[in-house]
Image: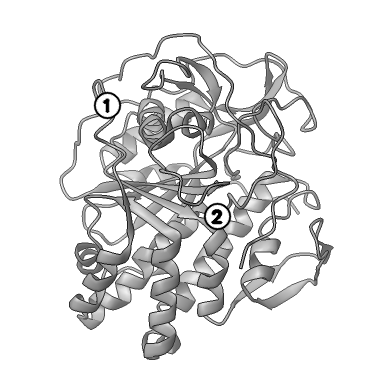
């Protein structure tokens, strides 16, 4: 069943741009904050590449990615890239049960892409053996069969950098705002990039290879794997679980058809309802950042349900869930689900830590609203990621409380 387009996030074909050349990697340190940002601008300011954040939120808040604008088009879904870890969550249970042949059958079913072979130039080195990083992207396309490794066909509205510790006991999911102002290297054909832009422009201009290059250039950390989630099929994943329970902090009415009312308290939601809930932003003082907070709560609820006894002990429900996941996910060629099952056998949602790349909120650059990175904090965070010392960074940088 098709999911209705998201009216508040038009996606557009990428404009051709040129500009500053890509800066080199800096000895494993993050190459963040390469451009200065201007004065603050209200969240309703001009937003040529994408809809701006609704507010200037504290560095502990979260926000999703953006589309690049020239001509307005109606998109499909591009939210919730955090849910890419669902494949890993289900494999936690499979690894614990030792059903490796069963897992291998889904290993053969899942879609594959090759984001790394097209990357030219130097890449950040791998520093800590055993630790690895997965770039999770929520993607949507007007052509479901479009290759994700090429420009122009796909858009990403959510970008998450997932760091798995060397002992495989914990994973840190770092949200990168869609409007984060970064340097995008030149695309393979030379037509786009080589300029400062909003982060998700990289995907529109050069597909997965350019997105990987841009994220590696910004963080200074090597990407080991990529998982792309097409959310047109994700509603079926939630329905296969029998729905999820989500906390609604205040009663609101959806701004999207059929204009559901979400009542304060714990709500049991099916696929359509839960995806509608985590799309809402206008009703909250921190706008896009509230939306990502709800996405994280949604991810935890889905993961808990996925590895619950009620799912793992029910062969029909488990099989339906697994089939729904593999239909909605594409991974790189080296991503081995059976190996992941073994490595993640001791992990559950309690082992996930949600973060956001340090930022200064919405600011104005050349007449458009962007999210400005917090250079000193970002340098420290990604240095900790590269050295597998994120726990120390988190202890020194507790998250800011969400606004009421």
Image coordinates for residue 144, horizontal then vertical, percent = 50, 52
Task: Identify the mark nearer the N-term, 2 or 1.
Answer: 1
Q: Closer to the camera, 343 or 384?
A: 343
| Residue located beneath label 1 in the image | 28
Of 289 and 278, which appears nearest the observer? 278
Residue 387 place in picture, x, y as percent:
25, 38
Q: In this rendering, is residue 258 above or below 279?
A: below
- Residue found 29% across the figure and 42% down from its top: 114
Q: In which quadrant of the rendered image does the N terminus lie?
A: bottom right
Please provide percent x and percent y for residue 388. Answer: 27, 44
Q: Distance between the residues labelled 2 and 1?
A: 29 Å
- Against 271, residue 47 (above or below) is above
Query: Which residue is rendered at x = 82% and y = 56% of the image?
Result: 255
Q: Which class describes the residues within 10 Å of circle 2: few (<14), some (14-19), or many (20+)? A: many
Q: Does 278 sit above or below residue 12?
A: below
Residue 80's label in the rendered image is 2
Q: Is residue 84 left or right of residue 165?
A: right
Q: Which colour scheme is used?
A: one colour
Q: Is residue 161 above or below residue 343?
A: above
Mark 2 vs mark 1: in front: 2
Q: In this view, does 70 lie to the left or right of 375?
A: right
Label 1 environment density (alpha carbons within 10 Å; few <14, some 14–19, many ≥20): many
Relative placement, left or right, of 213 versus 82 is left
Residue 71 position, x and y percent, is 70, 29
Specify the quadrant that holds the C terminus.
bottom right
Identify the secondary structure beneath mark 1.
loop
Image point (70%, 34%), residue name = 52
Circles 2 and 1, Cβ within 8 Å, touching? The answer is no
Query: In this image, 99 relative to 161: left or right?
Result: left
Quarter residue 390 falls in: top left
Asked which secondary structure carries label 2, the reply is loop
């Amino acid at each position: 069943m098709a999911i209705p387009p998201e009216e508040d996030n038009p996606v557009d074909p990428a404009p051709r741009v040129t500009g500053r050349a890509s800066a080199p990697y800096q000895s494993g340190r993050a190459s963040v904050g390469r451009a200065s940002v201007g004065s603050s601008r209200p969240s309703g300011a001009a937003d040529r590449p994408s809809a701006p954040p609704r507010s200037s939120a504290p560095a502990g808040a979260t926000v999703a990615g953006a589309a690049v604008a020239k001509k307005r088009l109606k998109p499909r879904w591009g939210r919730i890239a955090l849910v890419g870890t669902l494949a890993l969550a289900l494999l936690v249970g499979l690894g614990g049960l030792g059903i490796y042949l069963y897992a291998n059958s889904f290993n053969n079913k899942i879609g594959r892409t090759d984001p790394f072979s097209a990357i030219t130039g130097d890449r950040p080195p791998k520093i800590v053996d055993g630790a690895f990083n997965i770039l999770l992207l929520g993607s949507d396309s007007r052509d479901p069969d479009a290759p994700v490794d090429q420009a122009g066909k796909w858009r990403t509205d959510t970008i998450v950098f997932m760091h798995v510790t060397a002992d495989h006991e914990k994973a840190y999911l770092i949200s990168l705002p869609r409007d984060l102002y970064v340097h995008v290297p030149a695309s393979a054909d030379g037509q786009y990039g080589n300029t400062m832009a909003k982060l998700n422009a990289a995907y529109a201009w050069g597909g997965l290879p350019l997105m990987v290059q841009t994220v590696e250039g910004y963080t200074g950390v090597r990407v080991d794997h990529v998982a792309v989630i097409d959310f047109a099929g994700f509603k079926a994943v939630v329905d296969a679980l029998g729905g999820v329970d989500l906390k609604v902090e205040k009663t609101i009415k959806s701004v999207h058809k059929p204009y559901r009312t979400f009542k304060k308290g714990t709500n049991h939601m099916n696929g359509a309802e839960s995806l509608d809930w985590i799309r809402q932003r206008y009703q909250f003082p921190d706008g896009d950042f509230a939306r990502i907070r709800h996405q994280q709560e949604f991810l935890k609820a889905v993961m808990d349900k996925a590895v619950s006894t009620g799912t793992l002990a029910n062969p029909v429900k488990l099989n339906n869930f697994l089939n729904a996941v593999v239909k909605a996910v594409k991974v790189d060629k080296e991503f081995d689900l059976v190996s992941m099952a073994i490595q993640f056998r001791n992990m559950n949602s309690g082992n996930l830590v949600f973060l956001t790349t340090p930022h200064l909120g919405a600011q104005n650059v050349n007449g458009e609203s962007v999210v400005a990175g917090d250079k000193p904090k970002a340098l420290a965070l990604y240095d900790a990621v590269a050295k597998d010392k994120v726990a120390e960074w988190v202890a020194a940088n507790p998250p800011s409380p969400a606004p009421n």
